Image (spheres, coloured by chain):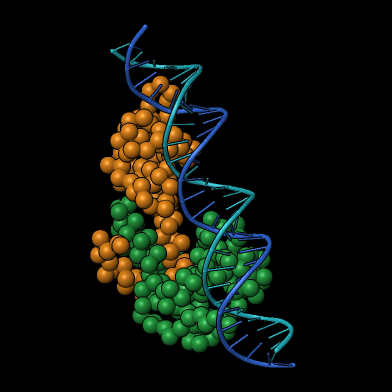
Chain colours: A orange, B green, C blue, D cyan
DNA sequence: GAGGTGTATTACTACGCATAGTACACCAAA
DNA sequence: TTTGGTGTACTATGCGTAGTAATACACCTC
Protein backbone atom coordinates (compact mmCIF):
# COMPACT_ATOMS: atom_id res chain seq x y z
CA UNK A 1 0.00 0.00 0.00
CA UNK A 2 2.78 2.39 0.88
CA UNK A 3 5.46 1.35 -1.54
CA UNK A 4 8.44 3.64 -1.33
CA UNK A 5 11.77 3.72 -3.08
CA UNK A 6 14.61 3.96 -0.62
CA UNK A 7 17.14 4.54 -3.38
CA UNK A 8 15.23 7.46 -4.88
CA UNK A 9 16.56 10.94 -4.48
CA UNK A 10 13.11 12.00 -3.37
CA UNK A 11 13.05 12.06 0.43
CA UNK A 12 11.19 9.21 2.09
CA UNK A 13 8.91 11.52 4.02
CA UNK A 14 7.96 13.23 0.77
CA UNK A 15 7.19 9.93 -0.92
CA UNK A 16 4.97 9.01 2.00
CA UNK A 17 3.26 12.36 1.82
CA UNK A 18 2.54 12.02 -1.88
CA UNK A 19 1.48 8.42 -1.62
CA UNK A 20 -0.99 9.13 1.14
CA UNK A 21 -2.37 12.10 -0.71
CA UNK A 22 -2.70 10.05 -3.86
CA UNK A 23 -4.64 7.34 -2.04
CA UNK A 24 -6.87 9.98 -0.51
CA UNK A 25 -7.58 11.51 -3.91
CA UNK A 26 -8.37 8.16 -5.44
CA UNK A 27 -10.74 7.44 -2.61
CA UNK A 28 -8.86 4.35 -1.51
CA UNK A 29 -8.48 5.99 1.86
CA UNK A 30 -11.78 7.56 2.89
CA UNK A 31 -12.58 10.07 5.59
CA UNK A 32 -11.76 8.88 9.10
CA UNK A 33 -9.87 5.87 7.83
CA UNK A 34 -7.10 5.15 10.29
CA UNK A 35 -3.57 5.25 8.95
CA UNK A 36 -0.86 2.84 10.08
CA UNK A 37 0.80 3.87 13.33
CA UNK A 38 4.03 5.80 13.17
CA UNK A 39 6.05 2.98 14.67
CA UNK A 40 4.22 0.24 12.81
CA UNK A 41 4.63 1.77 9.40
CA UNK A 42 8.24 2.63 10.14
CA UNK A 43 8.92 -0.98 10.97
CA UNK A 44 7.14 -2.20 7.86
CA UNK A 45 9.08 0.12 5.60
CA UNK A 46 12.35 -0.37 7.42
CA UNK A 47 12.77 3.30 8.15
CA UNK A 48 13.00 5.43 11.24
CA UNK A 49 9.81 6.36 13.12
CA UNK A 50 10.89 9.99 12.97
CA UNK A 51 10.71 9.88 9.20
CA UNK A 52 7.14 8.61 9.20
CA UNK A 53 6.25 11.11 11.88
CA UNK A 54 7.58 13.91 9.72
CA UNK A 55 5.38 12.85 6.82
CA UNK A 56 2.33 12.65 9.04
CA UNK A 57 3.01 16.07 10.49
CA UNK A 58 3.23 17.60 7.03
CA UNK A 59 0.01 15.86 6.03
CA UNK A 60 -1.70 17.23 9.12
CA UNK A 61 -0.32 20.69 8.52
CA UNK A 62 -1.93 20.61 5.10
CA UNK A 63 -5.23 19.29 6.38
CA UNK A 64 -4.99 15.93 4.65
CA UNK A 65 -5.06 13.94 7.87
CA UNK A 66 -5.63 14.61 11.53
CA UNK A 67 -3.73 13.03 14.39
CA UNK A 68 -4.91 12.38 17.90
CA UNK A 69 -2.35 11.77 20.59
CA UNK A 70 -2.73 8.35 22.11
CA UNK A 71 -5.15 7.24 19.40
CA UNK A 72 -3.76 7.44 15.90
CA UNK A 73 -3.84 9.33 12.62
CA UNK A 74 -6.83 9.50 10.30
CA UNK A 75 -7.84 10.80 6.91
CA UNK A 76 -9.46 14.21 7.30
CA UNK A 77 -12.59 15.62 5.70
CA UNK A 78 -11.49 16.00 2.12
CA UNK A 79 -11.97 18.96 -0.15
CA UNK A 80 -11.77 17.10 -3.43
CA UNK A 81 -11.32 20.17 -5.59
CA UNK A 82 -8.38 21.38 -3.55
CA UNK A 83 -6.76 17.97 -3.66
CA UNK A 84 -7.23 17.79 -7.41
CA UNK A 85 -5.36 21.04 -7.78
CA UNK A 86 -2.49 19.41 -5.98
CA UNK A 87 -2.59 16.50 -8.37
CA UNK A 88 -1.99 18.94 -11.20
CA UNK A 89 0.91 20.70 -9.57
CA UNK A 90 3.75 18.69 -11.08
CA UNK A 91 1.86 18.34 -14.31
CA UNK A 92 1.56 22.10 -14.74
CA UNK A 93 5.25 22.54 -14.12
CA UNK A 94 6.10 19.94 -16.73
CA UNK A 95 3.80 21.56 -19.27
CA UNK A 96 5.38 24.92 -18.60
CA UNK A 97 8.85 23.49 -19.11
CA UNK A 98 7.88 21.71 -22.31
CA UNK A 99 6.34 24.85 -23.76
CA UNK A 100 9.46 26.82 -22.88
CA UNK A 101 11.48 24.19 -24.73
CA UNK A 102 9.38 25.09 -27.75
CA UNK A 103 7.20 21.99 -27.75
CA UNK A 104 3.72 22.82 -29.01
CA UNK A 105 0.50 22.16 -27.14
CA UNK A 106 -0.61 19.93 -29.99
CA UNK A 107 2.46 17.75 -29.59
CA UNK A 108 1.80 17.40 -25.87
CA UNK A 109 -1.82 16.47 -26.44
CA UNK A 110 -0.83 13.93 -29.06
CA UNK A 111 1.66 12.44 -26.65
CA UNK A 112 -0.96 12.06 -23.96
CA UNK A 113 -3.32 10.33 -26.36
CA UNK A 114 -0.64 7.80 -27.24
CA UNK A 115 0.55 7.46 -23.68
CA UNK A 116 0.90 3.92 -22.41
CA UNK A 117 1.02 3.45 -18.68
CA UNK A 118 4.19 1.76 -17.64
CA UNK A 119 6.45 3.64 -20.01
CA UNK A 120 8.54 4.90 -17.14
CA UNK A 121 12.23 4.09 -16.77
CA UNK B 1 21.05 33.83 -21.63
CA UNK B 2 21.93 31.52 -18.79
CA UNK B 3 19.58 32.67 -16.10
CA UNK B 4 19.79 30.47 -13.06
CA UNK B 5 18.09 30.53 -9.70
CA UNK B 6 20.60 30.34 -6.89
CA UNK B 7 17.86 29.88 -4.30
CA UNK B 8 16.29 26.94 -6.10
CA UNK B 9 16.64 23.48 -4.65
CA UNK B 10 17.65 22.29 -8.09
CA UNK B 11 21.45 22.13 -8.23
CA UNK B 12 23.11 24.90 -10.21
CA UNK B 13 24.97 22.46 -12.43
CA UNK B 14 21.67 20.80 -13.30
CA UNK B 15 20.05 24.11 -14.13
CA UNK B 16 22.96 24.91 -16.42
CA UNK B 17 22.66 21.52 -18.05
CA UNK B 18 18.96 21.91 -18.71
CA UNK B 19 19.28 25.50 -19.86
CA UNK B 20 21.98 24.65 -22.37
CA UNK B 21 20.05 21.68 -23.64
CA UNK B 22 16.93 23.77 -23.95
CA UNK B 23 18.76 26.40 -26.00
CA UNK B 24 20.19 23.65 -28.20
CA UNK B 25 16.73 22.18 -28.79
CA UNK B 26 15.26 25.55 -29.63
CA UNK B 27 18.07 26.15 -32.09
CA UNK B 28 19.29 29.27 -30.32
CA UNK B 29 22.63 27.54 -29.97
CA UNK B 30 23.57 25.87 -33.23
CA UNK B 31 26.20 23.30 -34.01
CA UNK B 32 29.76 24.43 -33.30
CA UNK B 33 28.59 27.51 -31.47
CA UNK B 34 31.11 28.25 -28.76
CA UNK B 35 29.83 28.27 -25.22
CA UNK B 36 31.04 30.74 -22.59
CA UNK B 37 34.28 29.69 -20.96
CA UNK B 38 34.14 27.86 -17.68
CA UNK B 39 35.74 30.70 -15.77
CA UNK B 40 33.90 33.41 -17.66
CA UNK B 41 30.45 31.96 -17.13
CA UNK B 42 31.25 31.22 -13.52
CA UNK B 43 32.18 34.83 -12.96
CA UNK B 44 29.05 36.07 -14.74
CA UNK B 45 26.79 33.87 -12.68
CA UNK B 46 28.68 34.43 -9.46
CA UNK B 47 29.32 30.74 -8.95
CA UNK B 48 32.37 28.57 -8.72
CA UNK B 49 34.17 27.47 -11.89
CA UNK B 50 33.99 23.88 -10.68
CA UNK B 51 30.21 24.09 -10.80
CA UNK B 52 30.17 25.23 -14.41
CA UNK B 53 32.79 22.63 -15.26
CA UNK B 54 30.60 19.92 -13.82
CA UNK B 55 27.68 20.99 -15.99
CA UNK B 56 29.85 21.06 -19.10
CA UNK B 57 31.25 17.63 -18.36
CA UNK B 58 27.78 16.16 -18.03
CA UNK B 59 26.75 17.82 -21.27
CA UNK B 60 29.77 16.36 -22.99
CA UNK B 61 29.12 12.94 -21.51
CA UNK B 62 25.67 13.06 -23.07
CA UNK B 63 26.93 14.26 -26.43
CA UNK B 64 25.28 17.66 -26.24
CA UNK B 65 28.54 19.56 -26.43
CA UNK B 66 32.19 18.79 -27.03
CA UNK B 67 35.10 20.37 -25.22
CA UNK B 68 38.61 20.90 -26.48
CA UNK B 69 41.34 21.53 -23.98
CA UNK B 70 42.96 24.89 -24.54
CA UNK B 71 40.21 26.00 -26.91
CA UNK B 72 36.75 25.89 -25.47
CA UNK B 73 33.40 24.10 -25.44
CA UNK B 74 31.05 23.91 -28.37
CA UNK B 75 27.60 22.66 -29.28
CA UNK B 76 27.88 19.19 -30.81
CA UNK B 77 26.21 17.75 -33.86
CA UNK B 78 22.65 17.49 -32.74
CA UNK B 79 20.30 14.56 -33.11
CA UNK B 80 17.08 16.52 -32.92
CA UNK B 81 14.87 13.52 -32.33
CA UNK B 82 16.95 12.35 -29.42
CA UNK B 83 16.93 15.80 -27.88
CA UNK B 84 13.20 16.03 -28.29
CA UNK B 85 12.81 12.82 -26.35
CA UNK B 86 14.68 14.51 -23.55
CA UNK B 87 12.31 17.44 -23.66
CA UNK B 88 9.48 15.02 -22.95
CA UNK B 89 11.18 13.28 -20.07
CA UNK B 90 9.73 15.30 -17.20
CA UNK B 91 6.45 15.64 -19.03
CA UNK B 92 6.04 11.89 -19.32
CA UNK B 93 6.74 11.44 -15.64
CA UNK B 94 4.13 14.03 -14.74
CA UNK B 95 1.54 12.40 -17.00
CA UNK B 96 2.27 9.04 -15.45
CA UNK B 97 1.83 10.47 -11.96
CA UNK B 98 -1.40 12.23 -12.86
CA UNK B 99 -2.87 9.09 -14.38
CA UNK B 100 -1.90 7.12 -11.29
CA UNK B 101 -3.71 9.72 -9.22
CA UNK B 102 -6.79 8.84 -11.27
CA UNK B 103 -6.83 11.94 -13.42
CA UNK B 104 -8.18 11.13 -16.87
CA UNK B 105 -6.38 11.79 -20.14
CA UNK B 106 -9.24 14.03 -21.18
CA UNK B 107 -8.78 16.19 -18.11
CA UNK B 108 -5.08 16.55 -18.85
CA UNK B 109 -5.72 17.48 -22.46
CA UNK B 110 -8.32 20.03 -21.41
CA UNK B 111 -5.86 21.50 -18.96
CA UNK B 112 -3.23 21.89 -21.65
CA UNK B 113 -5.67 23.62 -23.97
CA UNK B 114 -6.49 26.14 -21.26
CA UNK B 115 -2.91 26.50 -20.15
CA UNK B 116 -1.64 30.05 -19.86
CA UNK B 117 2.10 30.51 -19.87
CA UNK B 118 3.25 32.25 -16.75
CA UNK B 119 0.96 30.38 -14.40
CA UNK B 120 3.90 29.17 -12.41
CA UNK B 121 4.43 30.22 -8.79
C1' DG C 1 -0.75 -1.20 35.18
C1' DA C 2 0.51 -2.61 30.48
C1' DG C 3 0.90 -1.53 25.98
C1' DG C 4 -0.35 1.06 22.25
C1' DT C 5 -0.75 5.83 20.30
C1' DG C 6 1.29 10.70 18.75
C1' DT C 7 4.78 14.07 19.94
C1' DA C 8 9.17 16.27 21.19
C1' DT C 9 14.02 16.61 21.90
C1' DT C 10 18.93 15.97 21.31
C1' DA C 11 22.79 14.03 19.15
C1' DC C 12 24.87 11.89 15.50
C1' DT C 13 25.98 10.14 10.72
C1' DA C 14 25.87 10.34 5.71
C1' DC C 15 25.54 12.52 1.54
C1' DG C 16 25.42 15.94 -2.11
C1' DC C 17 26.14 20.71 -3.46
C1' DA C 18 29.12 24.27 -3.66
C1' DT C 19 33.23 26.83 -2.64
C1' DA C 20 38.28 27.65 -2.38
C1' DG C 21 42.70 27.03 -3.85
C1' DT C 22 46.08 25.03 -6.58
C1' DA C 23 48.10 22.80 -10.38
C1' DC C 24 48.70 20.93 -15.04
C1' DA C 25 48.41 20.62 -20.13
C1' DC C 26 46.99 22.76 -24.09
C1' DC C 27 46.45 26.47 -27.62
C1' DA C 28 46.55 31.13 -29.78
C1' DA C 29 48.40 35.49 -30.26
C1' DA C 30 51.69 39.11 -29.25
C1' DT D 1 59.20 32.55 -26.37
C1' DT D 2 56.14 34.63 -23.37
C1' DT D 3 51.60 35.73 -22.03
C1' DG D 4 47.02 34.83 -21.22
C1' DG D 5 43.13 32.25 -22.08
C1' DT D 6 41.21 27.56 -22.43
C1' DG D 7 39.61 22.76 -20.29
C1' DT D 8 40.79 19.53 -16.69
C1' DA D 9 42.13 17.44 -12.24
C1' DC D 10 42.73 17.20 -7.42
C1' DT D 11 42.26 18.05 -2.41
C1' DA D 12 40.18 20.26 1.33
C1' DT D 13 36.45 22.53 3.52
C1' DG D 14 31.84 24.33 4.74
C1' DC D 15 27.06 23.67 4.74
C1' DG D 16 22.31 22.16 4.59
C1' DT D 17 19.15 18.29 4.42
C1' DA D 18 17.76 13.58 5.15
C1' DG D 19 17.81 10.05 8.01
C1' DT D 20 18.98 7.41 12.12
C1' DA D 21 19.30 6.55 17.11
C1' DA D 22 17.88 6.89 21.62
C1' DT D 23 14.99 8.87 24.92
C1' DA D 24 11.28 10.88 27.13
C1' DC D 25 6.60 12.58 27.78
C1' DA D 26 1.52 12.70 27.61
C1' DC D 27 -2.38 10.50 26.16
C1' DC D 28 -5.76 6.67 25.43
C1' DT D 29 -7.64 1.85 25.71
C1' DC D 30 -8.11 -2.46 27.76
Residue in front for this viewpoint, A101 or C18: C18
Tell me which residue sits at (43%, 64%) in the image.
A94
Tell me which residue sits at (33%, 38%) in the image.
A46
Residue in front for this viewpoint, C3 or B84: C3
Quadrant (top left/top right/bottom left/bottom right) for the C terminus of chain A = bottom left
Up the image or down, D17 lies above or below B17; here it is above
Q: Report whether residue A92 is seen.
A: yes
The answer to which image quadrant residue A75 occupies is: top left
Q: Report whether residue A76 is seen.
A: no
Quadrant (top left/top right/bottom left/bottom right) for the N terminus of chain A = top left
Tell me which residue sits at (57%, 69%) in the image.
B52
Answer left or right for A24 relative to B43: left
Answer left or right for B21 relative to A25: right
Q: How many marks?
A: 0
Percent position (x, y) of residue A72?
A: 37, 27
Percent position (x, y) of residue B26?
A: 48, 80
The answer to which image quadrant residue B5 occupies is: bottom right
Up the image or down, D9 lies above or below B98; here it is below
Percent position (x, y) of residue A117?
A: 25, 61
Percent position (x, y) of residue D12?
A: 60, 54
Answer left or right for A120 relative to B69: left
Tell me which residue sits at (53%, 55%) in the image.
B9
Up the image or down, A9 lies above or below A24; here it is below
The answer to which image quadrant residue A53 occupies is: top left
Answer left or right for B69 relative to C20: left
Amino acid sequence: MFNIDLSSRVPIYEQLYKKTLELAIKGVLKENTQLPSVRGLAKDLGVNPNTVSKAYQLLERDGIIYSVSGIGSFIAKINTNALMEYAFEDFDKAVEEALKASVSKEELIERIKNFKVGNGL
